Image (cartoon, rainbow, N blue to C red):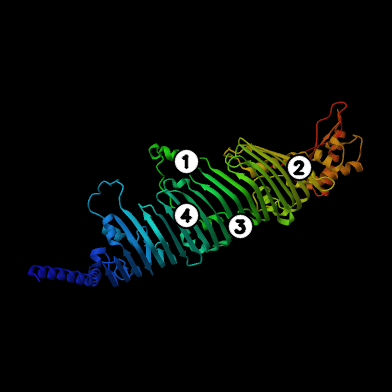
Amino acid sequence: MKKWLKVVLWVVGVLLGLVVLSTILVAPVAKSYVNNHGEELLGRKVHIDELSVNVYTGHLALRRVALYEDNGSDLFVSFDTLDVKIKLLKLLSHTVHLKHLTLAGLDARVEDRGGVFNFQSLIDHFASDTTEEEKDTTPSDWVMKFYNTRISHAQLRYRDVKQHQEWHLPDVNLRVPGFVLGGEETSEGGLNIGFTEGGRLSLQASLDEQQDRYSLSAHLEDFALSNLQPLFADMLRLQRLGGTVDVQLNASGTLGEVMKSRIDGKLVMQRVDLVGGEGSVMSFDRFEVLLDELNLDEGRYNLRSVTLDGLAAKYEQWSDHNTLSDILVQQKEIEPADTTESAVTPDTAAQKSQPLQLHVGKVAVRHCNLTYADYTLPDAFVFPISDINIEATDLRFNGDNNARLRAVLPGGGHLLLDWKGNIDHWKQHQQLFLSIKGLDMKKLSPWTVYYTGQPIEDGIFSLTTRATIRNSQLESHNKLDIYKARVGSRRKDVDPEMKLPLKTALYILKDKDDKILIEMPVSGNIDSPEFNYMKLVWKTLGNLLVKVATSPVRALAGALGAGGEDLDFIDIDPSQRSLTSEQYHTLGSLAKVAQRDTLLVLTLTQQMPPAANDTVAKGYAFRNEVVRRYLIEQGVSAQQIQVLTGEPQQEGGRTGYAISSEMKIDE
């Protein structure tokens, strides 16, 4: 063999030996270097238990790796195995071809320390000190191909140090059979996440980069709402958030116009219970939404149906707090956003003006119970409404809608509400028909005590209301039907909103069957800052009651079946020495009216004949005393009686007592 050939063979052999030796030594050398110089490389302590590299096959394996926190003792991220295989020769043709990637046993801990996360030092370590260069917008000719990517049995932990809240995902699994960027192949993959308190999230996605099309299917199955309770800690004070949710969503569209994607699916929530400091705030058996189409770009929301079953909710009001304030966390004031013209682009302005297109094919609310309690009144007002059922079809945000509500009221009463109106422009057009039948009036007593100082002791109440709103103007026609109403004495411990002759008016308004029918119109402009419907109703009702009670004799004539104005005057012959039985009966009827309310004052003015002398005048004074004494004997307070003698009448005038009345009401 020639000498030069021997030299070449020796050189090639030595080089091959060096390559083999370096291949054998690269893994332990790299592992030792990383373990000893991890803080220089990453800014933190890192430990690799096992590392293997095969430069010929492009295979890299790491086992039992731990990256520590800044303190060097607490774990930040660890994993059992990272196994990667790449086609190295493909790099020469500007292609990253990952044959497989497996990450097993990942355990990552993220902490929010008052807005600063525990990975901030890693970001700072790799931050460049040089001035950022202008970005190159030239399209890349690199192709990225990732196949058989798996993350199995990963654990993700999140902790908010300031809020003392933790969130743990104990079983995260990711599977991507193929993902390509810059190529012609379709990418697809899936993600599965298990939650600590129960439930799983499954995602399936595919991407066709050439067609610029994507599809996504998501299924959140039997997800425990208690998983979300830490996330609401900044907004809600809840002792417990119970229940499960199941969500199925399908989305498809183009990546270039994601807002135009078509989305459909359904949401089901079951056995939901929100518990605050005072107990359950709201619970329901089932809430279901079936979504046929959602298009964010066009603002179109097409819901097939919305169903709510078994809702139970209670709202309580105290002088300094209420149910909502008890569970809502007060938010800090936020600096107002920049609303100058420069901050609003034509695109955003057009987006804001996009009208909402909402359509719900069917709304069904079934077997719900609501309780309103007001403890700010002199007497506690607790008003439960049970078995609430609401039905509506073809409900739209714009245009006229129809809905019907039925419910059971306390004491066996019933409520029916028919509504027709526009949701978006609600001040322009609304029609309402309300029917309340058989309501136990004692349930309303706390409100009558608050407004008038008088409790309701008995009675059955029915109401029919037909109301319209047109261009902010309310017109309401109300018919009250009250049977056997009985009002108690005025409370001395209450300073009422208004002093109304409630007891007197109800007594006068009753017919022979102990029934009251009242027609009461109510109107007003809802845009007025002083508009308050309840106060308007009470003012209208109060004016009616005052009008009746301040003319009790005229009203009593109808109630007793007597004729017209005859009871406004008691005819007495000047020569009478005493009163007749009929005259005493009329005085007795007036006494009954006066006894109904201490605010009523009766004035009886005796009319003398013309040219009456002193003897006649003395006889009239004696008769005045007889009338006064008789009324007091009938139980009328002396402060409620005025018996006077008027001026002599002209020739042909009536003689006797002219009866008038007034109510001592403070305005």
Q: Label 3: few (<14), some or many (≥20) within 10 Å?
A: some
Is label 3 in a helix, a strand or a loop?
strand
Residue holding disc 4: 216
Q: Earlier in the sequence, mark 3 or mark 1?
A: 3
Residue 495 lies, with reference to residue 119, above or below; the image says above
**Amino acid of disc 3:** Lys
Residue 6 visible from this viewpoint: yes
Q: Earlier in the sequence, mark 4 or mark 2?
A: 4
Amino acid at pointer 4: Leu
Mark 2 and mark 3 in contact (Cβ < 8 Å)?
Answer: no
Residue 506 vs 164, above or below: the answer is: above
Q: Quadrant of residue 340 in the image? A: top left
Q: Secondary structure at mark 2?
A: strand
* Quadrant of the image containing the C terminus: top right
For this rendering, which residue is in front, 635 or 347?
347
As helix, strand or loop, the secondary structure at mark 1 comes to helix
Mark 1 vs 4, N-terminal side: 4
Residue on which disc 2 sits: 518
- Tell me if label 2 and label 1 are in contact, CB under 8 Å: no
Given the image, on which type of amino acid does mark 2 rest?
Ile
User: Is residue 430 shown left or right of residue 60?
Assistant: right
Residue 124 lies left or right of residue 595; in this view the side is left
Residue farthest top in this picture: 651
Closer to us: mark 3 or mark 2? Answer: 3
**Neighbourhood count class around disc 2 (C-alpha, 10 Å): few under 14, some 14–19, many 20 upward:** some
Work out how far the residue at label 2 is from the one at label 1, CA to CA, in angstroms.
49 Å
Task: Give the CA separation, mark 1 to mark 4.
Answer: 27 Å
Question: For mark 3, what is the residue?
Answer: 314
